[in-house]
Amino acid sequence: MHSALDETLVQLVDDDGTPRGTAPKASVHGPDTPLHLAFSCHIEDRDGRLLVTRRALTKATWPGVWSNSFCGHPAPGEPLEDAVRRRARQELGLEVTEVSPILPGFRYRATDASGVVENEICPVFRAIADRDPRPSPDEVVEWQWTTADRLRSAVVAAPYAFSPWLRLQLQQLDLGAL
C-alpha cells in the first residue's frame, strides 16, 4: 500500500506511454488536455452480468451518460491493479477480485459538448464483484446489471447516451469472453 499516495496528481505520458511528469488532476481536463494515464474497468458478477453505471450529473465530463462500471487515474507510481481496486472501493463501495487486463493498449481522445477533452492511455480491466454496488453519489447517479447483448443493443440504439470510451471499447471487446 502506498502511504504517500497522492491521488490529486495524474501521470502525464509521452505518445508511447513513457512517464513524463505529473500534473494536478484538477488541471488536466480542459480544451487542451495533455496525454495522461487512466484506466477503465468492467465489473462482472458471478452470474456473468455486467455492471454499467450512469455518471453523476455533477461530473465535469460527460455528465449523466451511461458508461462501463468505473474509470479512474492511478496515482503516480501506483500499480494499475491497485488503482482499480482503490477506485472500486471509492466510487462503487465494492471490493473486487480477479482484476485482469482485457484491453491493455486501449487509448482514446474525445471532446464532450462543453469542449472538455479526454486524452488518455487507458488500459481496460475486468474484475469480479460479489454484491451490488453502493456508489458514491458524486460519481454515480444510477447503476444496473445487464448482459453483454443488451448493452450492445442499447449502445447501437442510442449511442449518444453512452460514454465515447465505452462505445470504443465495445468495438474491441468480446464481452461474452469476459
Image (cartoon, rainbow, N blue to C red):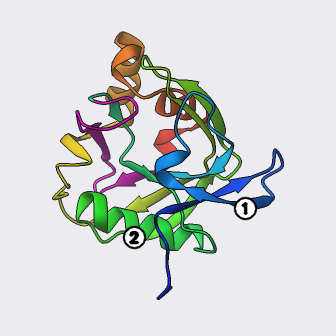
In front: 102, or 10?
10
Asked whether residue 150 appears in the rendered view, the answer is yes
Task: Give neighbour class at mark 2: few <14, some 14-19, many 20+ (Cα, 10 Å).
Answer: some
Q: Position of residue 132 (x, y in %)?
A: 17, 58
Q: Position of residue 21 (x, y in %)?
A: 72, 61
* Image quadrant in which you'd find residue 141: top left
Residue at mark 1 to residue at mark 2: CA–CA distance: 22 Å
Secondary element under disc 1, as helix, strand or loop, is: strand
Pointer 1 with pointer 2, Cβ within 8 A: no
Question: Which residues, given as a range, are shown in magenta?
Answer: 41-63
Secondary element under disc 2, as helix, strand or loop, is: helix
Give residue 21's mark.
Answer: 1
Q: How many numbered circles are shown?
A: 2
In front: 23, or 68?
23
In front: 139, or 44?
139
Q: Residue at x 52, y 33 (%)?
A: 165
Task: Give neighbour class at mark 1: few <14, some 14-19, many 20+ (Cα, 10 Å).
Answer: few
- Label whose residue precedes the other's in the sequence (1 or 2): 1
Q: Residue at x 17, y 49 (%)?
A: 137
Q: Residue at x 46, y 49 (%)?
A: 26
Give residue 86's mark.
Answer: 2
